[in-house]
């Protein structure tokens, strides 16, 4: 019967062909390495995009020389939280490089990371940065430290903590600096910190989805200052943007973890290459590349070598001072966490109890 | 049976049922599975997820201050946009149908442009053009403390862009079909242009105008791609329901995401059912 | 007569002739005011942003714009978008026709409800659509065991992106076909049946040609919508650069990477393509009538 209707036949064949090519394209994720070729999928957050752009070819050469295996990479860069969620929900990344430990923990909790990634060098942290400010050239609003952010009429950009790891670092940096007494005009306790947070949040104009969107918005001329990573500002300047970096006297150290995703590397048969890649990231060579692209090295050797570009910060505190992410996330960013409670006050709304 | 009686007997039945090789039921099965898989199951899944912890939790999630404000913002910006769009859309359709002027065909083509631009790009364009760093945006901010972009007016602007074709294209065909006899009669009786428009032209247009308006509103409620760029997304100020849902999905608050989604879907569904009801009623009238 | 009174008379004369002119040309004035209002509105709302897009794309010249698109990632992204859109169009054309047929020719319980549901994807936020699919096909999703057993990946892969696009484009074809089918005179179908044609032949040779225009417009709308899909695909994920990225995801990434010319040029290319489709089918339809 079908041959009486050639059009139907052609249409069905076309549909079939399209479907199979499509499935073939997407199905390659579960290919096992064939002999001397292996494919690694890297899921990273947006900030180190440029750094990995340079590190990956270096690793490819290194690995080929060492094992004779050719490694190809599939890379995905998006907001740390979004990336972490994607992996936990089924995005089969072999290696994850994220902005904060909590995002790795999420993948751990999903049962996908089963080894002790913290036993890697520097506690599994491949790079660090610090919360800093991007200001317009010439610093017209005279922003030199946290306290200056509370000046009325200032327009501040910071991303949304719901979708951005960077945003969480920003808030914690702000809070910590105030609580530790480094913000003049505010008491060195929780009340002072929350008052300061309120004052700053009043000035926030735009809350982008991610740290990178936030800084590119700033580049479009929006706002007077962007609270961001020191790293983002440096990379932006390298890309030709003419804003200035302001390092506050007291800020939080942003630690960026990397880990192999056990479930997927075993599924893809790429464990050796993946672990090789992660190990490579801690070598002097890779660390120097990170330093080249605005990221501080946790390794003392490279840190000392690049001290000129990365001046030491007067009062540098860490997430541990907040009891780790396990405590910080619900305390600050839960439904009635400190952040949302204070944010509600900006609009005169009561949140929680 | 003669040809005539065959047709006559078919006419007694208002629906014509052709015989198909695989039978009526297999065709129904195909249609039903398609709809089930593509439409009904996804909707059911959200319903199930939103109510999975009971009605109380569902209510709690949507009455969270941020969620509530997001829903309110979405509704009022969409409503304002719909009003403006209805007026300007009807006017545009009127001008296109009733008048001749140079560039009319160009204008007619431009109407459909918003359908061709990805929403993401719309957002970017509006920020670049009307953002606070640009001449117009900066001037408005300095003079009137009025922000367009990164504030609710920016939301309305983006929505106006996106939904522009709906009212115009809804009204245009009906307007073209209108019989102008009554208008001429009214004119000879001394009625002014505005009176003629209000009492003779507008009534038969009321249905397409309302349908177009409802479509715009329904489309606007869920808009994401342009809003996430243009609105500022400040909770309690410029964060719409769709952006809020996105935030909840990203931060693992599944129930919150599902609950607010259900509200959005319910509103849209109500509107579309109403628009459909109006369509049916008009068909009944003209049949 | 004093100077002031003569100038006053002149003033009154000018005023009265102005009023007379206005009165005579009231309708013309009204007409041009309205036209001016509409043109100004469209110029501000539609033309200006799109011009900004064009300017942004060509800010370093047409050569730079084309060069920015001459990138393997761009080709992959556009190919993916095209491929997804084609699959979606084909599936909706086939199944949409079936559904429209059922609707118009048959009566069944729940018809009104399903009729309303068909319009849903139009109004549902793309974020919600993507999220729905995630609930179904994510790692802890309802259908996770099924797809795991089949060994295919849906979420964060092409199939998920196709499904997301299928969802958001569902109404267009059906909505275009139903009125056309309703208006279609079934006499011809009945005649064909009495002449011995079976159901399939009747459909293919009698009904289908009459549906042409509804179908063409439905295809155009579906295609244009599929080309621009962003929100749902963003949530269901899978846009790995150079592999499963779509054109809109590429634009999004390019903006993030400060590749503004590339982003605007890609947006322009995408917009032009959709525009040609929409305007083309408009023009075809006008020619027909």
Image (spheres, rainbow, N blue to C red):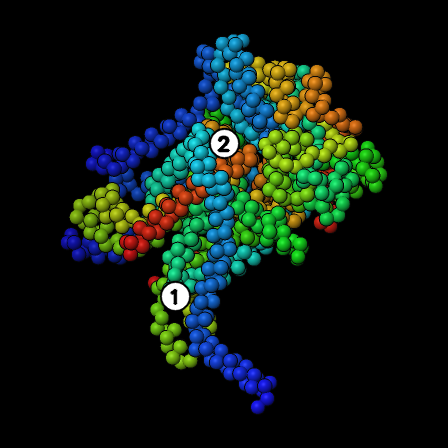
Whether discs 2 and 1 lie on one chain: the answer is no
Looking at the rendered image, the quarter that the N terminus of chain C falls into is bottom right
Q: In this rendering, is residue B233 above or below B187?
A: above
Compared with residue A337, is residue C153 higher up or lower down, i.e. above or below?
Answer: above
List the residue tagged with mark 2.
C239
Residue A196: x, y in percent?
78, 41
At label 1, counting other C-alpha atoms closer than 10 Å, the crowd grade (few under 14, some 14-19, many 20 or more) is few
Q: Examine the rendering and report whether any part of residue A195 can be seen.
A: yes
Are the two marked residues, 2 and 1, in contact with CB atoms closer than 8 angstroms?
A: no
Distance CA(mark 2)–CA(mark 1): 48 Å
Q: Residue at x 47, y 63 (%)?
A: C36
Q: Secondary structure at mark 2?
A: loop
Dividing the picture into quadrants, the one containing residue A250 is top right
Residue under the point 55% across and 24% down = A53
**Residue A257 relative to residue A331: left or right:** left
Judging by the rendered image, the residue that carries numbered circle 1 is B98
Q: Which mark is residue A162?
A: none
């Amino acid at each position: 019967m079908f041959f009486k209707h050639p059009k139907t036949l052609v249409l069905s064949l076309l549909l079939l062909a399209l479907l199979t090519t499509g499935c073939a394209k997407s199905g390659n994720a579960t290919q096992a390495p064939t002999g001397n070729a292996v494919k690694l999928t890297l899921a990273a957050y947006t900030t180190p995009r440029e750094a990995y752009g340079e590190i990956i070819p270096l690793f490819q050469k290194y690995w080929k020389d060492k094992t004779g295996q050719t490694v190809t990479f599939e890379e995905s860069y998006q907001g740390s939280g979004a990336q972490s969620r994607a992996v936990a929900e089924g995005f089969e990344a072999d290696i994850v490089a994220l902005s904060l430990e909590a995002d790795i923990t999420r993948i751990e909790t999903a049962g996908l990371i089963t080894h002790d990634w913290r036993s890697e060098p520097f506690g599994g942290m491949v790079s660090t940065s610090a919360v800093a400010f991007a200001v317009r050239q010439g610093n017209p609003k005279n922003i030199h430290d946290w306290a200056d952010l509370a000046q009325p009429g200032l327009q501040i950009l910071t991303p949304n903590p719901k979708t951005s790891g960077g945003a969480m670092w920003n808030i914690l940096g702000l809070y910590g600096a105030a609580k530790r007494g480094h913000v003049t005009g505010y008491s060195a306790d929780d009340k002072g910190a929350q008052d300061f947070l309120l004052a700053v949040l009043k000035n926030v104009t735009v809350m982008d989805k991610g740290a990178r969107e936030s800084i590119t918005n700033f580049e479009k001329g929006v706002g007077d200052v962007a609270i961001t990573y020191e790293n983002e500002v440096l990379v932006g300047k390298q890309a030709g943007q003419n804003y200035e970096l302001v390092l506050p006297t007291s800020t939080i150290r942003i630690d960026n973890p990397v880990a192999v995703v056990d479930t997927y590397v075993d599924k893809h048969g790429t464990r050796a290459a993946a672990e090789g890649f992660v190990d490579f990231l801690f070598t002097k060579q890779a660390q120097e590349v990170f330093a080249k692209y605005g990221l501080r090295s946790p390794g003392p050797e490279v840190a000392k070598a690049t001290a000129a570009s990365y001046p030491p910060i007067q009062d540098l505190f860490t997430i541990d001072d907040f009891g780790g992410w396990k405590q910080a996330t619900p305390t600050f960013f839960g439904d009635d966490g400190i952040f949302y409670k204070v944010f509600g006050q900006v609009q005169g709304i009561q949140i929680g109890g | 049976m003669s040809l005539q009686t065959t047709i006559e007997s078919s006419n007694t039945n208002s629906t014509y049922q052709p015989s198909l090789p695989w039978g009526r039921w297999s065709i129904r099965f195909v249609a039903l599975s398609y709809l089930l898989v593509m439409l009904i199951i996804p909707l059911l899944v959200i319903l199930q997820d939103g109510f999975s912890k009971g009605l109380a939790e569902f209510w709690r999630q949507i009455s969270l201050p941020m969620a509530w404000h997001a829903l309110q913002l979405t509704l009022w910006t969409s409503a304002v946009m719909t009003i403006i769009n209805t007026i300007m859309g009807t006017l545009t359709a009127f001008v296109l149908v009733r008048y001749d002027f140079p560039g009319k065909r160009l204008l007619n083509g431009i109407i459909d442009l918003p359908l061709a631009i990805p929403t993401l790009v719309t957002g970017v364009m509006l920020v670049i053009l009307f953002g606070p760093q640009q001449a117009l945006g900066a001037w408005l901010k300095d003079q009137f403390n009025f922000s367009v972009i990164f504030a609710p007016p920016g939301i309305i602007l983006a929505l106006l862009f996106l939904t522009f074709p709906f009212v115009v294209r809804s009204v245009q065909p009906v307007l073209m079909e209108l019989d102008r006899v009554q208008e001429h009669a009214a004119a000879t009786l001394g009625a002014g242009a505005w009176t003629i428009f209000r009492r003779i032209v507008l009534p038969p247009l009321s249905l397409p105008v309302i349908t177009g308006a409802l479509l715009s509103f329904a489309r606007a409620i869920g808009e994401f791609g342009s809003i996430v760029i243009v609105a500022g997304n400040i909770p309690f100020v410029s964060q719409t329901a769709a952006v809020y849902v996105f935030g909840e999905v990203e931060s693992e608050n599944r129930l919150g995401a599902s609950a607010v989604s259900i509200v959005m879907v319910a509103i849209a569904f109500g509107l579309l059912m109403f628009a459909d009801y109006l369509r049916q009623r008009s068909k009944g009238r003209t049949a | 007569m004093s100077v002031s009174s003569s100038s006053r008379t002149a003033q009154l004369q000018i005023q009265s002739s102005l009023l007379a002119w206005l009165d005579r040309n009231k309708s013309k004035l009204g007409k041009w005011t309205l036209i001016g209002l509409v043109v100004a509105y469209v110029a501000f709302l539609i033309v200006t942003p799109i011009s900004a897009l064009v300017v942004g794309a060509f800010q370093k010249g047409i050569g730079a714009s084309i060069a920015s698109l001459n990138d393997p990632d761009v080709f992959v992204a556009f190919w993916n978008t095209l491929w997804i859109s084609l699959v979606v169009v084909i599936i909706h054309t086939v199944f949409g026709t079936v559904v429209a047929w059922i609707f118009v020719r048959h009566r069944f319980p729940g018809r009104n409800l399903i009729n309303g549901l068909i319009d849903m994807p139009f109004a549902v936020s793309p974020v919600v659509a993507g999220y729905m699919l995630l609930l179904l096909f994510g790692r802890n999703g309802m259908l996770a065991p099924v797809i795991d057993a089949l060994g295919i990946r849906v979420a964060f892969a092409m199939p998920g992106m196709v499904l997301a696009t299928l969802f958001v484009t569902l109404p267009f074809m059906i909505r275009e076909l139903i009125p056309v089918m309703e208006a279609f005179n079934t006499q011809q179908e009945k005649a064909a049946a009495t002449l011995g044609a079976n159901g399939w032949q009747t459909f293919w040779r009698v009904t289908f040609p009459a549906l042409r225009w509804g179908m063409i417009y439905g295809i155009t709308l579906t295609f244009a919508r599929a080309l621009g899909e962003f929100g749902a695909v963003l949530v269901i994920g899978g846009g790995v650069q150079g592999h499963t990225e779509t054109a809109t995801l590429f634009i999004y990434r390019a903006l993030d990477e400060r590749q503004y010319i590339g982003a605007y040029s890609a947006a322009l290319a995408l917009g032009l393509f959709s525009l040609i489709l929409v305007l083309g089918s408009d023009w075809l339809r006008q020619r027909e009538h």
